[in-house]
Image (spheres, rainbow, N blue to C red):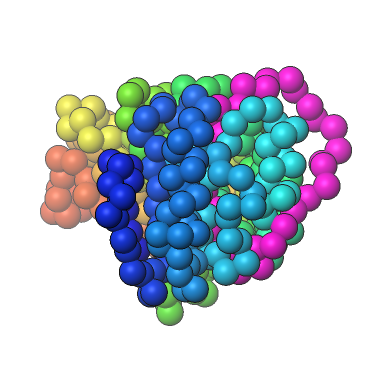
């Protein structure tokens, strides 16, 4: 059982609530905007609701939106979900979090609104003393990338599964600090959808019996007032920076932004030996055409020199356009890989072309049949 209640009800002295099985309470201060310090009356209402009107031994979820509640007013030991709004400076915020989170052994979800913190002094020194949250799985923060990163350094989260930051229009240069250098899992998914960018590390073995994501990082730039920054493919390069993923054997890339073979070569340089590659062009604008031959330089596949696609076993294209005759040489070369006619001795490549624009299977086979050996070698 959970409850939302309007602060107008607190004006009545006749309000009485019997909630012995109440498990969650969400208190939202609408009298002040989120980036302003909450007023004393709102804080008192929240304290009253938590400790008097809605007191419950089963309370496990508390969300305080638009106000900062004194540590003594938060019953932390039983909480599994907590949402806080933080104000003032980074130093005072870090101390407040230490006070609040020092006794939260069961906490699995934490949400922090950091938009009121405007301390922008850059500090890249050693990590401060951290707060151990052994069971935390989900961390959500609202604020600039820099502030979110600074606050995240105070948290030790060995069981974390997902981090989401909502940054509005703030610069993204500190976002790369959230990407692990040695992630668990052998499958990587990266998705770009307008103002959303997500990176997921997954274990392939779990795909057959229900997917288990080891770690996911999401950036959201849109807000209720602004559309936010529109992500492009170059943001992914900035996010990954110099990281290399030698244990990743399967890579799925979905984007709403056009790219070319030069970009894809840069992106694939983060891997050493992929066995599966899946590319999806998810642009909602139907008039934008992205031809399949502009995606990957086929010289990377079955290359005699070290290449991330040298041992590729499966290649999937989705939502790319196939045009005749422009795409024919490219498709014919791909077909030679599927027939094991590339002279490498490797198993034939499994090729899937899904939801292709302007072509069906009959036309695709006609393309193969219409081109001679010269096109196949091009």
How many labels were placed on the picture?
0
Specify the quadrant that holds the N terminus. bottom left
Q: Where does the C terminus fall, quadrant-wise?
A: top left
Would residue 260 be found to the left or right of residue 18 on screen? Answer: right
Task: Give the image location of residue 43, x and y in percent.
Answer: 49, 40
Q: Is residue 116 magenta?
A: yes
Q: Position of residue 324 (x, y in %)?
A: 20, 35
Res. 165 visible in picture: no
Magenta span: chief secondary structure: loop
Between residues 28 and 314, which one lies in front from this camera angle? 28
Asked where in the image residue 305 lies, by quadrant, the reply is top right
Write the start and end of the magenta stretch as one range.
102-131
Q: Quadrant of residue 210?
A: bottom left
Rendering quarter of residue 196: top left
Judge whether residue 69 can be spotted in this image: yes
Q: Residue at x 21, y 30 (%)?
A: 285
Q: Nearer the viewer, residue 72 or 183?
A: 72
Q: Is residue 180 left or right of residue 295?
A: right
Q: Residue at x 53, y 65 (%)?
A: 80
Identify whether 124 is placed above or below 330.
above
Q: Nearer the viewer, residue 376 or 97?
A: 97
Picture coordinates of residue 260, whole percent (x, y): 44, 29
Residue farthest to the bottom? 209
* Residue 129 horizontal side relative to residue 148, left or right: right
Residue 40: % across, % down: 51, 34
Q: Is residue 193 magenta?
A: no
Residue at image position (39%, 42%) is 28
Name the residue furthest right: 126
Q: Is residue 32 above or below residue 140?
A: above
Q: Nearer the viewer, residue 243 or 28?
A: 28
Q: Residue at x 67, y 22 (%)?
A: 119
């Amino acid at each position: 059982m959970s409850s939302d209640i309007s602060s107008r009800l607190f004006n009545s002295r006749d309000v009485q609530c019997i909630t012995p099985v109440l498990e969650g309470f969400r208190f939202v201060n609408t009298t002040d905007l989120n980036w302003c310090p909450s007023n004393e009356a709102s804080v008192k209402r929240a304290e009253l609701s938590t400790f008097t009107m809605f007191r419950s031994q089963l309370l496990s979820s508390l969300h305080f939106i638009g106000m900062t509640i004194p540590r003594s007013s938060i019953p932390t030991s039983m909480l599994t979900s907590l949402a806080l709004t933080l104000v003032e400076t980074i130093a005072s915020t870090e101390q407040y979090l230490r006070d609040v989170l020092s006794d939260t052994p069961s906490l699995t979800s934490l949400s922090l609104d950091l938009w009121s913190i405007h301390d922008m002094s850059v500090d890249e020194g050693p990590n401060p003393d951290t707060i151990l949250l052994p069971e935390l799985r989900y961390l959500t923060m609202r604020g600039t990338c820099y502030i979110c990163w600074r606050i995240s350094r105070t948290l030790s989260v060995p069981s974390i599964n997902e981090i989401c930051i909502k940054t509005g229009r703030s610069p993204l240069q500190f976002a790369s600090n959230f990407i692990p250098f040695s992630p668990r899992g052998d499958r990587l998914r990266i998705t770009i959808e307008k103002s959303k960018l997500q990176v997921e590390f997954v274990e392939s073995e779990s795909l057959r019996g229900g997917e288990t994501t080891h770690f996911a990082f999401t950036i959201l730039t849109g807000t209720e007032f602004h559309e936010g920054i529109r992500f492009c493919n170059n943001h992914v390069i900035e996010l990954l920076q110099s990281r290399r993923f030698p244990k990743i054997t399967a890579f799925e890339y979905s984007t709403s932004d056009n790219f070319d073979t030069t970009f894809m070569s840069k992106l694939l340089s983060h891997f050493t030996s992929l066995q599966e590659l899946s590319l999806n062009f998810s642009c909602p604008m139907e008039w934008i055409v992205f031809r399949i031959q502009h995606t990957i330089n086929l010289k990377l596949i079955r290359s005699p020199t070290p290449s991330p696609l040298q041992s590729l076993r499966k290649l999937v294209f989705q939502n790319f356009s196939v045009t005749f005759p422009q795409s024919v040489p490219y498709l014919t070369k791909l077909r030679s890989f599927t027939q094991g006619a590339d002279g490498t001795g490797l198993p034939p490549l499994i090729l899937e072309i899904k939801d292709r624009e302007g072509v069906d299977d009959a036309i695709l086979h006609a393309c193969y049949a219409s081109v001679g050996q010269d096109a196949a070698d091009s």
